[in-house]
Image (cartoon, helix red, strand yellow):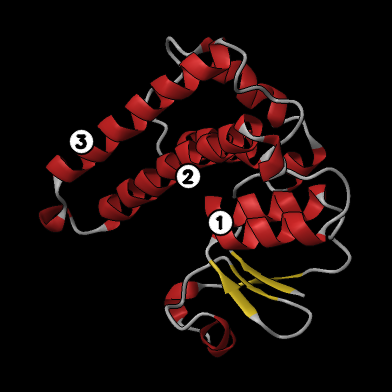
Amino acid sequence: MKLFISPASPFVRKCRIIVREKGLSHQVTEIDTVPYDNPADLLQVNPIAQIPAFVREDGVALTDSLLIGAYLDHVGQGAALVPSVTEGDLHWAVRRHEMLGHGVLDLSVKCVLERRRPASEQSPSHIERWKGGILRSLDVAEALAAKGELHASPLTLGNLTVGVALTYLDFRLPDFVWKDGRPALVALQAALETRPSFVDTAPR
């Protein structure tokens, strides 16, 4: 199996963590890729030239971190990172947490890409709107963490995605001061970042 990666991408990092947590490291070859170069091997897997992109053992291509993550969780070893749908509220809670973190990632990457445009082409109003969405989402996550509904153990696709989002903010948007007034999220991030899978995939 192959996973097209860039060490700085938070969506890629999510998948790389899952690979490690599910005991798939020896079965998945990570291919460092520059999507903007439109490399031919990436385009064969994902015609829109985005990462992560994944190739199964049977040659079938999977794109988008949500789909790839779900597949890796399904084929990997150990406890599922998403409880079975038969577990009712627990399943949907993890899914909600995952989408909350995914939303923060999506808006964060938009901010980063917008800031890379020439200053004359940037939209400060868009950046402020996205920043507002990020901080409001983190307020929701803080409330969940403070109530004990979002915690570091056991690892799920929910807390994993939120943790990746928090560290990506530190990495790419350090001026987005998110830690003030959110001690539960600070503790969640600190606990997750001690896991070997997180240490091994730290963004760079």
Determine the residue positioned at 26% across, 30% down.
132
Spatial separation of the CA atoms under disc 1 and disc 2: 9 Å
Q: What element carries label 3?
A: helix
- Tell me if label 1 and label 2 are in contact, CB under 8 Å: yes
Comparing 90 with 200, the one in front is: 90
Q: How crowded is mark 3: few (under 14 residues within 10 Å), some or many (20 or more)?
A: few
Checking the image for residue 36, the label placed there is none
* Residue 204 place in picture, x, y as percent: 59, 50
- Establish if 39 lies above or below 171: below
Amino acid bearing label 3:
Glu
Q: In this view, does 161 lie to the left or right of 103?
A: right
Determine the residue positioned at 60% across, 19% down.
149
Mark nearer the viewer, 3 or 2: 2
Comparing 104 with 199, the one in front is: 104
Amino acid bearing label 2:
His
Amino acid bearing label 1:
Leu
Q: Name the residue that disc number 3 marks.
A: 128
> Is any part of residue 9 visible from this angle?
no
Checking the image for residue 66, the label placed there is 1
* Residue 159 place in picture, x, y as percent: 62, 33
* Residue 200 place in picture, x, y as percent: 76, 46
Comparing 82 with 120, the one in front is: 82
Determine the residue positioned at 56% across, 17% down.
145
Q: Earlier in the sequence, mark 3 or mark 2?
A: 2
Residue 160 quadrant: top right
Q: Which of marks 1 and 3 is nearer the N terminus?
A: 1
Q: What element carries label 1?
A: helix
Q: Is mark 2 on a helix, strand or loop?
A: helix
Q: Name the residue that disc number 2 marks.
A: 102
- Establish if 182 lies above or below 31: above
